[in-house]
Image (tube, grey):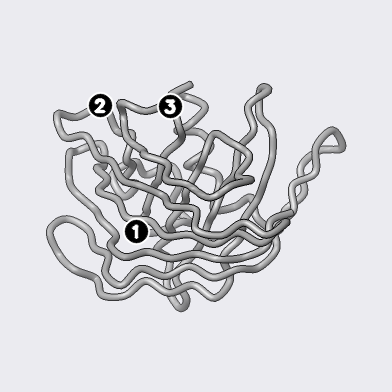
């Protein structure tokens, strides 16, 4: 399950708006994501805003997955929320190494997915520091989904990244 989560977190920024093989199609419809404050390695980078976020529902190895992905407008930072469930109702979903609900990753540069030093995840159990967070689904109306989130995440070297007072909304596939 951990390897599925890590793999999903690494590629989820590239999933929305894409099509996989003929056995499963993944499409995402534009949404928005923001965080009032986010940062890396002890610094505050300001506000994260994306006007082209994607919400994708898929199934991998029999597990329903809802992914909310965004790249910061005018930048290369990305936030990816992966939930191991088909989001159909409001409620709080806790994330971190002690949970099997999914996870959140944030990266400094989504184009460098192989550089683990710039990818921070709530489920990083390879260092003494372990992150966590929450996603609160506040509205589900058919395919329209809205919610809030916050998290603390760590990279492979144990450095911290965070986002506070996050929001997202959009239409899933």
Q: In this view, does 24 lie to the left or right of 63?
A: right
Q: Which of 58 and 9 is in front in this view?
A: 58
Crowding at mark 2 (Cα within 10 Å: few <14, some 14-19, many 20+): few
Where is residue 7 shown, x and y percent of the image? 51, 33
Labels 2 and 3 touching (C-beta < 8 A): no
Where is residue 23 shown, x and y percent of the image? 84, 33
Q: Which residue is drawn at 43% across and 27% down?
A: 100
- The quadrant holding residue 88 is top right
Choose the circle earlier in sequence order: 1 or 3. Answer: 3
Between marks 1 and 3 in the image, the one whose residue lies nearer the viewer:
3
Q: Residue 108 carries which label?
A: 1
How far apart are the two marked residues, 2 and 3, measured between alpha carbons? 16 Å
Where is residue 34 shown, x and y percent of the image? 42, 70
Q: Which residue is drawn at 40% across and 63% down?
A: 77
Labels 1 and 3 touching (C-beta < 8 A): no
Crowding at mark 1 (Cα within 10 Å: few <14, some 14-19, many 20+): many
Q: Mark 2 points at which residue?
A: 126
Residue at disc 3, secondary structure: loop
How far apart are the two marked residues, 2 and 1, measured between alpha carbons? 19 Å
Q: Residue at x 48, y 21 (%)?
A: 1
- The quadrant holding residue 86 is top right
Q: Mark 3 points at which residue?
A: 100
Choose the circle earlier in sequence order: 2 or 1. Answer: 1
Residue at disc 2, secondary structure: loop
In the rendered view of the protein, which quadrant contains the C terminus? Answer: bottom right
Residue at the right extreme of this rendering: 22
Q: Is residue 163 above or below residue 5?
A: below
């Amino acid at each position: 399950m951990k390897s599925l989560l890590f793999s999903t977190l690494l590629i989820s920024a590239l999933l929305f708006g894409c099509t996989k093989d003929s056995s499963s199609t993944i499409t995402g419809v534009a949404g928005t994501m923001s965080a009032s404050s986010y940062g890396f390695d002890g610094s505050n980078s300001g506000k994260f805003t994306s006007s082209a976020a994607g919400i994708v529902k898929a199934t991998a190895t029999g597990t329903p997955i809802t992914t909310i992905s965004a790249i910061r407008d005018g930048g290369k930072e990305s936030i990816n929320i992966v939930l191991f469930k088909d989001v159909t109702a409001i409620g709080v979903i806790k994330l971190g190494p002690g949970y099997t609900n999914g996870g959140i990753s944030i990266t400094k540069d989504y184009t460098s997915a192989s550089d683990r030093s710039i990818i921070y995840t709530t489920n990083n159990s390879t260092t003494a520091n372990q992150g966590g967070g929450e996603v609160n689904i506040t509205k589900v109306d058919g395919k329209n989904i809205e919610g809030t989130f916050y998290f603390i995440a760590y990279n492979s070297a144990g450095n911290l990244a965070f986002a506070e007072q996050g929001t997202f909304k959009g239409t899933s596939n």
